[in-house]
Amino acid sequence: MSGLRFEDIRKHFPGVKALDGVSFEAHAGSVHGLLGENGAGKSTLLKILGGQYRPDGGRILIDGIACQFQNAAAAIAAGVAIIHQELQYVADLSVTENLLLGRLPQRYGFVQRRAARLHAVARLRELGVDLDPDARLASLSIAQRQMVEICRALMRDARIIALDEPTSSLSHGETEVLFRIVRDLKARNKTLIYISHRLDELYALCNACTIVRDGRKVATHAQLSTVPRETLVSQMIGRDIADIYDYRPRPLGDLRLRVQNLSGGVLREPASFEVRRGEIVGFFGLVGAGRTELMRLVYGADRKRSGALVLDGAALTVRSPRDAIDAGIVLCPEDRKEQGIVPHSSVAENINMSSRRHHLRARLFLNKPHERDNADSYIARLRIRTPGHRQPIRLLSGGNQQKVILARWLGEPHLKVVILDEPTRGIDIGAKHEIYHVIYELAKRGCAVLVVSSELPEVLGICDRIVVMYQGRIRGELPRAAASEQKVLQLALPSDQLGAARIAVR
Amino acid sequence: MRHMQTENNDGRTAPAALAEYSLVLLYLAAFAVLSFTVDNFFSLRNMLGLALSMSQVGMVACTMMLCLAARDFDLSVGSIVAFAGVLCATLLNMYGSVLIAIVGALLGGALIGAFNGAVIAYLRINALITTLATMLIVRGLGFIVSDGQAVGVSNQGFIALGSLPLLGVALPVWITALCFVVFGIVLNQTVFGRNALAIGGNPEAARLAGINVDRNRLLIFLIQGVVTALAGVILASRITSGQPNAAQSFELDVISACVLGGVSLAGGRATISGVLIGVLIMGTVNNVMNLTNVDAFYQYVARGSILLAAVLLDQLRTRRENG
C-alpha cells in the first residue's frame, strides 16, 4: 500500500510513557487528522516520524517499506517533511534563499543567483503561492513564512507532510489559503498528517482521523465526516463535556472600568469602552485589528498618546504594568512564551512572581513556606499537570503554562479587572474548559474580565458582550443576545471580503 | 499524578539531580587527588594563601552573578578595582583618614556602577558596549588621578586591613565569605534576587508581571560598583599602594569563575554554590600551577582550556535536560 503506517510505536522518557503502542495508517492522497490533548503524545509521534527521536519499539512504514531514521536528515531524505508550530527559517534571508537553504545552486563556490531565483519562482507559481522571491522572511506575515516552509518541504520532494497546528497564528484569510494548499497537496497524492485542536478544521480537511490520549491510541475513524463532534471530544478527553462553554448568565454590578479616548501606537483613533463588575467582555477582530495594543495600553505596557482610565469611579493613572497591578488590573499576555513565562524558572517561581510581595517577612525576605503552599494549592485548584512545583515551566504544555500565568494573578489580593489576551490559543479542549471556569469564577467574584480572542465561537460562547475592532479602532459592539457569527463578522471584516472569509471561520 | 507526562518532558530524576551537583563532585574529587599528588597543596598555609588570592575575584563574582543572572554583563570591574585603589590611596594621603578614604572609594565605585546601570537600563545601550566603554574611561580616570604613578600608602591601620588575621584567617577572606553569605541570601531569599533571575529569564515577561526592570538593573550595577570598589580598596591595602595598572583582565577572571559555576550568560540561571565552586576551581588551578612551577606562559593556555571544558560540560548538561 502507499502511504504512511505506524506500527506499535513506543517511546518512554525517564518516568513517563510518552507513547505506549500507537498504530494507525494514513493513505496517500488523503489528509489524516491527529487529535489529542496537549501531552497526549502527538508531538512525540511527530518527532519520531521526523527522526528527532528514536522509538523504543515499533516501526514506521512508508509505502510499505520499514524505515529507521537515525536523524532528521534521514527522515527528510526519505520524503518526510514536518511543518512545526514553531517555524524554522532564517529571518534575514530572502524567500529564495530560504527555499533553497543548504542547496543553493553554485558554480566554483559562487551562488548562481539567477538560477536560484528562477527555480524558486517556478516552484512558487506551481504551488499558486503569490510571494516576492526577493522579500526577506522577516518582512512577511507568519502565514507567508509558513507557506515558504511548506514550499521548501515540497522542493525536497516530500511525500509525507505533517502539519503541527498550522493555523494557530493565522488570520481567517490566511487560513483559507493554507486550506487550499493542503487540498492541493492531497490531490497530488501526498500523504498528509494534520494536527489541530480546532475540530472544524479537521472536519473541513481530513478524510480520516486518529485520536490519542495519554500515549495510547483511542480510536481511528476512517470516515471522519460520519463521526459526531461529541464523540471526538469525549474520546479525546476521556469524559463527556456537554457544552464546552457552559455559559450561565450572572447579575452584573456597577461600572468597574471606564476607558476614555485611549490612543497610542497603532491605535490611531481614540478608543473608549466600559465594563461592569462581573461582566465578561470579548474583543474580536482580525489579526492586527488593534485588540492586543488596546489591552496593552490599558495595562500600561505601552506608552499612550492620550486617554484616561476611571476605575470604580476614581481616575486612575497607569504608567507601567506595576501601576496597573497595584490598582488591581492584570493581564495575561497573548504570546505566552515571549511575554508570559520565565522559561527556566520553576512553576512555583512563575506563580509567586507577583503576589510574593504581599507575603514578605520583615518586608525583605521571601516567605518560602507560603510560596510553596500557594503554588501547590493553585496546581491542585487549576489542575495544572506538572510533576511538582519545582518543575521548570518550559517543560509544561501550553495549556498548563497558561494556567500557571492565571495562577500568578489569582494570587493578587484585590483583583478588579482581568485582561486575557488569547487565553486559549493552542490549548486543548479539556484545558480550555477549565480556563473558562476560572473566567466565570472571576466574574462571579465581581471582576471585570476582558477577553481578546480570535476564535469566534469562543467569543460568542463565553462573553456577555462583544466589542469588535477593525483597523485600529472599535467598530461596534454587540450584547450577547444580539450577537451572531454573521453580525460579528460584518463588523470585523472589510465589507467586500465577508463572503470569502466566512468559509474559513472556525 | 495521572498526567505526569508533557510532550517534551524528560521528568526530573536522580541522575538529573546528580548532574546538578556534578561540578561540586568533580571539584571534590580533583581536590582529593591534588591533596595526595601535589606537595604542599593540602596544608593550612597553602589553603589560606589560596583563599586570600581569590578573595577579590570571589567578592566581585558574587555581584557579577546577579548581573549575569539578569542577562547583563560588566567588563568595567577590573578598571573599577584599579580606580578605587588609586582613589583610596590618594584620599588617604590627602586626609590621613582611613574612613574617608574607604567611603570615598566606595562612593566612586557606586557612581561608576550607577552610571553603567543608568546608561544600560534607561538609554538602552547594550551592556557589553557600555561597560567596554566605561572599562576604558575608568582605567583612564585611574591614571589621571594617580598621574600614571603608583600611589604609595604608609598608614599602618589601612595596611592592616589586607592582612589582619582574625581567628587565623586574613580579613579579606572573611569579607569574601560574608559576600557569599549575603549574596546567597539576596539571590534566594529576596524579591530583588528572584527578580534578577526573572529579568534574565524573560525580560518582557518580567516587566508584564509588574517587575520594574529598569530600576532593578540600575540597582544591580550600583551594587556591583560598590562591591568592586571594596575589592579595589582591599587590593590596595594588600599591596600597600594604589596601582593604576592593577587588576588587568580581572573582569575576565570574574566572568570565567561565574561561568565555570554554571551561571548562564543567556540569563535566568545562577546559583551561589556554583559561583563559589567556580571561584574555587580557578583559585585551585592557579595555585597548583604555581606550586608545580608551571611556566606562566602555559598557565594562560591551561586556564583557557579549563574554562572551555567547563562550559562544554554545562552545554552537555543543558542539552540532556532539554531532551
Image (tube, coloured by chain):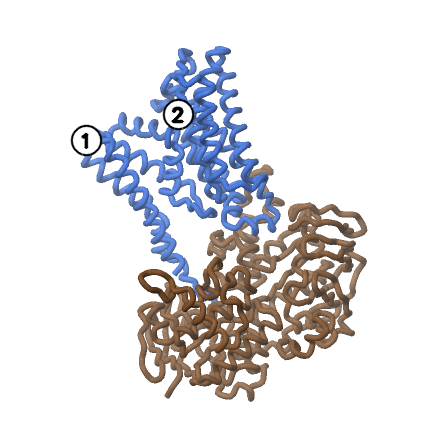
Chain colours: A brown, B blue
The amino acid beneath tag 2 is Pro
Question: What secondary structure is marked by label 1?
Answer: loop
Where residue B149 appears, x then y in whole percent? 40, 17
Q: Tell me which label, 2 or 1, sits earlier in the chain.
A: 1
User: Which label number is shown at residue A433?
Assistant: none
In this view, A322 is above or below A61: above
Question: What secondary structure is marked by label 2?
Answer: helix
Q: At x 78% / y 51%, what residue is drawn?
A: A310
Q: Are marks 2 and 1 on the same chain?
A: yes
Q: Residue beneath label 1, please?
A: B39
Chain letter for mark 2: B
Chain letter for mark 1: B
Where residue A504 appears, x then y in whole percent? 62, 77
Where residue A381 appears, x then y in whole percent? 58, 61
Q: Residue beneath label 2, please?
A: B172
Where residue A166 appears, x then y in whole percent? 52, 71
Q: Residue furthest front?
A: A114
How many C-alpha atoms fall within 10 Å of the one at disc 1: few (<14), some, or many (≥20)? few
- Of A307 and A91, which appears nearest the observer? A91
> A47 left or right of A259?
left
> A350 left or right of A265?
left
- Of A304 and B189, which appears nearest the observer? A304
The amino acid beneath tag 1 is Asp
Q: Quadrant of residue B281?
A: top left
Q: At x 41% / y 82%, what residue is drawn?
A: A24
Quarter of the image with the N terminus of chain A in it: bottom left
How many C-alpha atoms fall within 10 Å of the one at disc 2: few (<14), some, or many (≥20)? many
In this view, A206 is above or below B216: below
Q: Quadrant of residue A435?
A: bottom right
Q: Quadrant of residue A451?
A: bottom right
Is residue A234 shown to the viewer in this render?
A: no
